[in-house]
Amino acid sequence: MNFSQFLLILRARRKIVLLTLLATVLVTVVVSALLPKTYKATSTVLLNYKGVDPVTGMAAPGQLMPGYVATQIDIITSKNVALRVVDQLKLEHNTDVIAQFRQATDGKGTVRDWLAELLLKKLDAVPSRESSVVEISFKGAEPQFVAAVANAFADEYQKLTVQLKVEPMKKAASYFSDQTKQQRDALEAAQSRLSKYQQEYGIVSLDGRLDVESNRLNDLSAQLVLAQAQQMEAASRQRMASGQAGEAPDVANSPLIQTLRASVSAADSKVAEIGQRLGHNHPQYLAARAEANQLRANLTTQIQSTANSVGNNAQVLAQREGALRASLAEQKARVLALNRTRDELNVLQKDMESAQRAFDATTQRLSQTRMEGQAEQSEVAILNPAVAPIEPATPRMLLNTVLACMLGGVLGMGFGLVVELMDRRVRSTSDLTHVADIAVLGHISWAPPKPRSRLANLLAPRRLRLT
C-alpha cells in the first residue's frame, strides 16, 4: 500500500475517521470536565552546601555535590519531615481526618503515620539542572491547603537540616569535653611528675648548674695536667737528689750550700796555710782544722736537708696530683649525674609539652564545636515560598483536547484501515492491477447528474466517457 492508496482509503472512510475523532474529543472533554480539579503549589529552596565535617573540621571535596543534592531530596521526601508537617499543621486533630482514617484503615496504625504517607504520595521534590535549587511541590484539591503544605515541608526541612547539623555538633562537643578532661588530667599528672622530680633533686636552673659544673670539670682537668707535669719534674729531681745529692741541681743551686762550700774551701785553705807554717800539733792548726771539719759537717747536713726537702716537695706534688685526680673523678661523676638528670628532666618536660599541646588543641576544637553546635544557621534558604495557585494543575482542558484530537485522528485512521481490510474495495487502477493481476487499458469516469427527482434519476440514461 502506497501513500496515494492510503489517502484514497481515508477519503473513502472519512466518516469513520471523523466519527472516531469527534467521539474521542467529546469523551475527553466530558471526562476532563467531570474530573476533580487538582491544584499544585511549589516552594523553592536553595542549598548552600559547605561540606564541613563536625568532628575533624575538614572540608569535603566539591565532587560530592551531586550526592549531597540527592541526599537532600531523600530528606525532603522522608517520613520524618512528613510527620513534622502533620504536627505543624495539626492535621491529626481534625475530626474529619480521624473519621477518614478509621474508614480507610479500620483503626489500624496511627493517624500521624497515615497522614504522613498520604502527604508523601502527593509530594514531589525535583532539583534544578546544574543548580542548587530544589522545587518542593504538593498537589491537592484546595489551593490554600496545598500552599500551606508546600511551605510547611520547606520550613520543616529547613529546621531538620539545622537539627541534623546541630546534633552531631553536640555529640562531638560531648566527646571533646570528655577528651578535654582526660587531656587536663594527663597535663596535671605530667606537671606533677616534673615538679616532684625538680623538688627531689633540688633543680632550680639545670642548664646554669650544668654549665658551672662543666666549667669546674674543665678547670680540674687543666689543674690535673699541670700537677702531673710538676709531679713528674719533682720525681725526677727527687731521684737525682737521692742518688748524688751534692750534684743535684736543686742542691747545687742552693745559696746556703754555695756559701757553705765557699766557707769549707776557705777553711781548707787556711788549714793548709797554717800546716805549712806551723806543725800539725800546733793549737792554731788544730783549731783551724776543727773549724774546717765543722764547716764540712754543716755542709753535709745542709746537703742532706736540701735533698730531703726536694723529696718532700715531690711527695707533696704527688699527693696534690692524687687529690686532683680524685676531685676530677668526682666531678665527672657529678657531671654525668647532671646529664642523666637533664635527660630525665627533658623527657618529663617533653611529656608535659606534648600534654599541653594536646590539651590546647582539644580545647580549641571543643570551643569551635560548641560554637557551631549553638549556631542554629541552616544551610537551606527558602528562595520562593509557595502561594495559593489560581489555576488548577489538572485537568488541563486545552492540553487534553489537543491530545484527544491527536489520539482521535490516529484511532480514526486505524479504524478506517481495519474496516477497509475487512471490506476491501477497488479504489484505483493500481488496486485493480494488484488484485486481479491484469493490465488496465483505461478507466471510466462516471459522475451522476444532479438529481431532479427519484424517478427521473432512475429513468435517466447514464453517460459513459472513455479515456
Image (tube, helix red, strand yellow):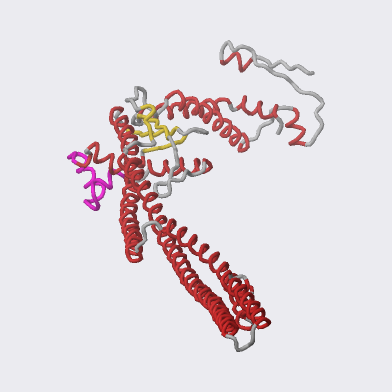
Instruction: Measuring from the top left, give residue 59's x and y in whole percent.
Output: 47, 43
Q: Observer-nearest residue: 27 or 302?
A: 302
Work out whether 329 lies above or below 464: below
Instruction: Measuring from the top left, give residue 386's x and y in whole percent.
Output: 34, 28
Work out whether 452 lies above or below 437: above
Residue range corresponding to the magenta coloring: 93-117
Q: Main secondary structure of the magenta part?
A: helix
Work out whether 309 lies above or below 118: below
Instruction: Measuring from the top left, give residue 179's x and y in whole percent.
Output: 34, 56
Asked if residue 117 shows in the view, the reply is no
Asked if residue 352 shows in the view, the reply is yes
- Picture mark count: 0
Picture residue at 59% right of the left edge, 77% below the top: 235
Work out whether 188 lies above or below 259: above
The magenta stretch spans residue 95? yes
Q: Observer-nearest residue: 217 or 183?
A: 217
Q: Quadrant of residue 285?
A: bottom right
Instruction: Measuring from the top left, give residue 172's x and y in whole percent.
Output: 35, 50
Tell whether 56 sits left or right of 296.
left
Q: Quadrant of residue 204?
A: bottom left
Q: Quadrant of the C terminus?
A: top right
Picture residue at 74% right of the left edge, 17% below the top: 464
Q: Observer-nearest residue: 349 or 53?
A: 349
Q: Quadrant of the N terminus?
A: top right
The magenta stretch spans residue 140? no
Q: Observer-nearest residue: 243 or 228?
A: 243
